[in-house]
Image (cartoon, rainbow, N blue to C red):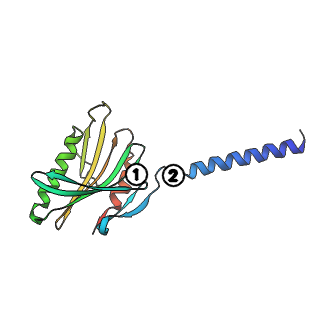
Amino acid sequence: MSKIVVARRGAMLALLLSVLCLAACSPKYNWREVRGKDARFVVLLPDKPTTLTRDINLDGITVAMTMTAAEVDGVNFAVGYVDVADGTRAAAALNAMKTALIGNIHGSIKPATPGTAIELEALGHRNDSSDALLLLGHFETKGNRAYQVIVLGSEKAVIRDEAMTFFNSFKSN
C-alpha cells in the first residue's frame, strides 16, 4: 500500500475515533443548578427546565402550584410548591399532594429505601398503558410552603443513581 493510502486511512480512523469520543462525552443528563421562582429553592435538574403555575384544589384548599420540571428519556424530574395562607394547613396540603400524585398514576405505595432522600415510592400506570410507572418522591413543608420533589417515569427508564443526584441536590429556602 502506498504511504498516501495509509495516511488517509489513519486520518479517517482518527476522525472516526474523535467523533465517537465526542459522542461519548455528550451527557444524556446535562445537570444544571436551577433556582425556583423567587429563589425559594435550589436543585440540580438534568436538562433545561420549564416552569408553570396553575390553581389546584388540595382537599378544599385552592392554591397556586408552581412546578419546575425537566425531562430526560421520558423520565420527569420536578419540584412543585404551594403557599398556604394558613401555615397550620401546610401539612394537610402536603398530604393532599401525595394522595393526588398517587391517584394520578393509579398507584400504590411501596416501602421506600430507608436512609435515602426518597420518602415515597409508588408503582402505577397511565390510563392508556400497561407499562409500569415508578413515582419517587420527597415531600416537606417550610413555614407556609409545601414542596413536592418527584421523579416519575417508566419503571424501566428511571435510573436510581440519577434520581438520587436530583433528590440530594434539593434545598428549600
Residue furthest front as drawn: 54
Question: In the rendered view, does 89 fall on the left or right side of 48?
Answer: left
Alpha-carbon distance for marks 1 and 2?
12 Å
* Neighbours of disc 1 within 10 Å: few (<14), some (14-19), many (20+): some
Q: Mark 1 is on which residue type?
A: Glu
Q: Mark 2 is on which residue type?
A: Pro
| Element on which disc 2 rests | loop
Q: Is residue 149 above or below residue 6?
A: below
| Element on which disc 1 rests | helix
Residue 69 in the image, given as x and y percentages of width and height:
35, 53
Q: Which mark is first along the chain, 2 or 1?
A: 2
Q: Is residue 38 above or below residue 100?
A: below
Residue 31 visible from this viewpoint? yes
The residue under the point 73% across, 44% down is: 13
Query: In the image, which disc is placed on residue 126?
Result: none
Residue 90 in the image, given as x and y percentages of width and height:
14, 61
Q: Which is closer to the viewer, label 1 or label 2?
A: 2
Residue 91 in the image, given as x and y percentages of width and height:
13, 59
Q: Which residue is mark 2?
A: 27
Query: 113 or 42, which is in the foreground?
Result: 42
Query: 152 or 155, which is in the foreground?
Result: 152
- In the picture, which quadrant includes the C terminus? bottom left
* Neighbours of disc 2 within 10 Å: few (<14), some (14-19), many (20+): few
Q: Is residue 160 above or below residue 80?
A: above
- In the picture, which quadrant includes the N terminus? top right
Question: In the rendered view, does 62 fall on the left or right side of 68?
Answer: left
The residue under the point 77% across, 47% down is: 11
Residue 35 in the image, given as x and y percentages of width and height:
35, 65
Query: 136 or 78, which is in the foreground?
Result: 78
Q: Which residue is mark 1?
A: 162
The residue under the point 63% across, 46% down is: 20
